[in-house]
Image: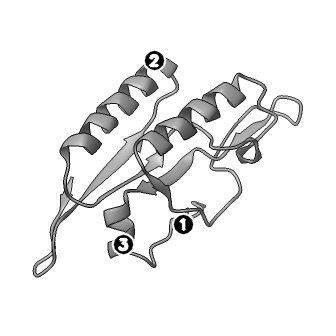
Amino acid sequence: MKVVRRGENPWVFSAISGGPNETTRHSLWSELSELRMTNSLPWMLGRDFNNIRSMAEHLNCIDNLIERYIRFNHWIENNELIDLGFAGPRFTWSTGKNLDTKKFTRLDKALCDQQWRSRFGEAAFRHLVQK
């Protein structure tokens, strides 16, 4: 979406829902990379990327996470995006019914390009806990 406020230059925001299917997620990354190449406005994208950036962003997950986070980090670097960091609960998603099957990850993230970061230098990403 294009964000426009009277008297200010516009910028672009993309709300992300990465989806659990790896093929679909990679298609989304390709589309976002194309948007990055064609968009000249400051850009911020955030929400559920359905991926982690490091092993510290999960607990009890044993899937192919190392390969996944390496590919995700390469995509971020290739698109010259900046991670806005995170404030809130350590994990934003969980599954499983008991301690033996419970898995936790932090899937929510906010990324931006240098133009957006320069314009909103004090901005931060905060996950508000829903009760």
Residue 31, position in %: x, y?
30, 31
Q: Which residue is mark 1?
A: 126
Q: Is residue 25 left or right of residue 103?
A: left
Sequence-wise first label, 2 or 1: 2
Q: Is residue 109 left or right of residue 41?
A: right
Sequence-wise first label, 2 or 3: 2
Q: Residue at x 76, y 47 (%)?
A: 56
Amino acid tagged 2:
Thr
Residue 48, position in %: x, y?
49, 44
> What mark, if any, has residue 118 been given in the picture?
3
Q: Is residue 65 above or below residue 83?
A: above
30 or 95: which is nearer to us? 30
Amino acid tagged 3:
Ser
Determine whether the residue tagged by mark 3 lies in a helix, strand or loop.
Answer: helix
Amino acid tagged 1:
Arg
131 or 73: which is nearer to us? 73
Q: How many other residues sit within 10 Å of disc 3, few (<14), some (14-19) or many (≥20)?
A: few
Front: mark 2 or 3: 3
Front: mark 2 or 1: 2
Determine whether the residue tagged by mark 1 lies in a helix, strand or loop.
Answer: loop
Marks 3 and 1: CB-CB under 8 Å?
no
> What mark, if any, has residue 23 been given in the picture?
2
Residue 86 figure quarter: bottom right
Q: CA distance from mark 2 to mark 1?
A: 29 Å
Q: CA distance from mark 3 to mark 1?
A: 19 Å
